[in-house]
Image: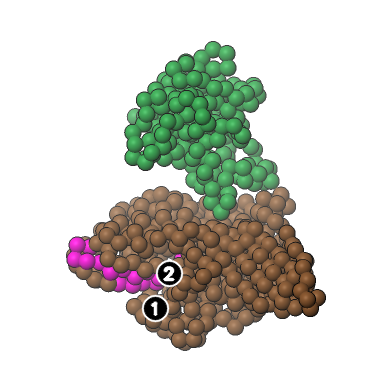
Amino acid sequence: MSKTVTQRETRGGTGGRGLSMRVVGCGNAQAGDDGAGLEIVRRLRERGDCTCELLERPQAGLELMDALRDADGVLFIDAVSSGSPPGTLHLVPLPSATVVPRALGAISSHGWGLAETLRLMAALHHRLPRLALLGVEIESAQPGAPRSAAVESAVQVVVERFEALEKFLTLEEEWDWVTPRRFAPGEPPTGKGGF
Amino acid sequence: MSQTNTQPAGLPLRTVKVDYLTRVEGEGGLYVRAEGGELREVKLNIFEPPRFFEAFLRGRHFQEVPDITARICGICPVAYQMSSVHALEAALGVKPGPEIRVLRRLLYCAEWIESHALHIYLLQAPDFLGYDSAIAMAADHPREVEQGLRLKKIGNNLLELLGGRATHPVSVCVGGFYKAPRRKDLLKLRSDLEWGLEASLETVRFVAGLKFPDFTPDYEFVSVTHPAEYPMNERRIVSSAGVDVEPAEFERVFVEEHVEHSTALHSRKGETGTSYFVGPLARLNLHLEKLLPRAREAAKTCGITWPSRNPFHGIVARAVEMAHAYEEALAIVEAYQEPARSREDIKVHAGEGSAATEAPRGTLYHRYQIDDQGLVEFAKIVPPTAQNYRRMEDDLRLYLPGILERPEPEIARACEDLIRNYDPCISCSTHFLKLKLDRE
């Protein structure tokens, strides 16, 4: 049974000392590997035991603020195409100059995207969440194509290890959010710097 | 960037460039040529690529048309859906009942609210208050920006509830809706709608107090009309110069044509070749007495004399319409009873139908021919922004002579401010603003 948990439940779920986190899946489910982020969130929702708030397909324009408000941390999960082998997982703070999320990076209405949303929130003295991207390196974003084996494997790893990732990101240490990491396909994202 | 050259007569050549018109939807450019201090040429160049919706609708089933045309615009999908379903229902002889009619007005209220709130607070208020962007304005006017965001959000929530999705609603179909909302779900929005009405009335007071340039061209205002209601979906088209026609006569009265410098078609009055004006200012000037009571009172007491020919008063017209939309949405929600059926049965046959409805930016006209299988044989879509392009150029021809001696950045900014009055949706109209000014 799918279940989406609110912020209050999140704090309880992390033992009361962790950050509240929202996980936002981005992408196009009809375009091959491009829907990896959406698929991860869909499977987490189906599993029903994720203690973060789950959101799919953030809206473009000003409504992107809804994905960022009232959370200590927001993890976007999106396809990336940075030149790494397909199935590579990137865990990087946002905005990132080197790993650009495909869908989130393209969200724009009236020329208004993530950077503009953050600037407006700052101008309005809203609390800015810590932002991170879990990027899944894709093989192809061909419309109508099935997900590639490498990306399917990466999706499975993320879903299986999501509880560890969640614990990792809800720790309060700043370095967890600002240190970019990359995990090669087939390499378990464990150990130092992993989850 | 400006350039200064001289001709043999020693007259200066000046070039003013505005790379892109900011705070509008889509991309356009403006070319202005002046000679000896006199304006010689004005061209509004639209370089948004043509989108060919009219072409690829051919061969599609009529029930696909609302979903496809909704993709023309992310800000005003409801408008495209409403014009398309009304035109196709005219072709098929379908007459949805009063409950569907009311739900469609409620859906349009939602779109007017979110579009007008966005334009007033985030796109145009910065012009009047002297800011380059909404972000810069937010630092000094956080309360106003927060109010605008909340006003827009409520419109989005209402649209999502009725339409099934906040962007490109999926519930609209020819004949009605795939699913009607539950009364209990609509009533959950009542307190937000009550807040929104009061906040909209405050918005009217706020924008009516802005400083407006003194600029009053002689416009012909055009909109849809209804005998008793402020116009949204039905039905005849009227103008301040005496036009009063059925939608089937629209193309005889208002003619589209290609112009060399634009990928969007331009419109003119067929008889006179002149431009005309669609949008909130046109609607308010033509139908003020049909506003609901609180919105009407706000319009009459805000300090603006109506009808107004000052395009800068468009921001006030939008605020009044936003108040009206909140007032009407509240009334509909409070009185709403779930319909027995959400849509009418349709007997498919060949036919042709046209309709005009009032998008947030003005009159949006559609015409379709369908065959006996219900497949589209022909589609014509005339967006409001495209209809306003010739009028925008005429405005610039009148406005520029008074400001040509200013520094180029000021001229560019003034041109942008003028065009933003029209809240142009350039992506819809092609099937913002790069200004090049040559002074010779």
What label does residue A39 carry, if any?
none
**Helix, strand or loop status at disc 2:** strand
Q: Amino acid at mark 1?
A: Phe
Residue B198, percent from left and from top: 57, 61
Instruction: Name the residue that disc number 2 marks.
Output: B382
**Picture residue at 60% right of the left edge, 63% below the top:** B29
In the depicted structure, whether residue A130 falls above or below residue B265:
above
Q: Amino acid at mark 2?
A: Val
Q: CA distance from mark 2 to mark 1?
A: 10 Å
Instruction: Name the residue that disc number 1 marks.
Output: B250
Q: Quadrant of residue B25?
A: bottom right
The chain painted green is A
Check contact, mark 2 vs mark 1: CB within 8 A. Answer: yes
**Picture residue at 33% right of the left edge, 66% below the top:** B379
Name the chain under label 1.
B
**Dot 2 crowding, Cα within 10 Å, few <14, some 14–19, many 20+:** many
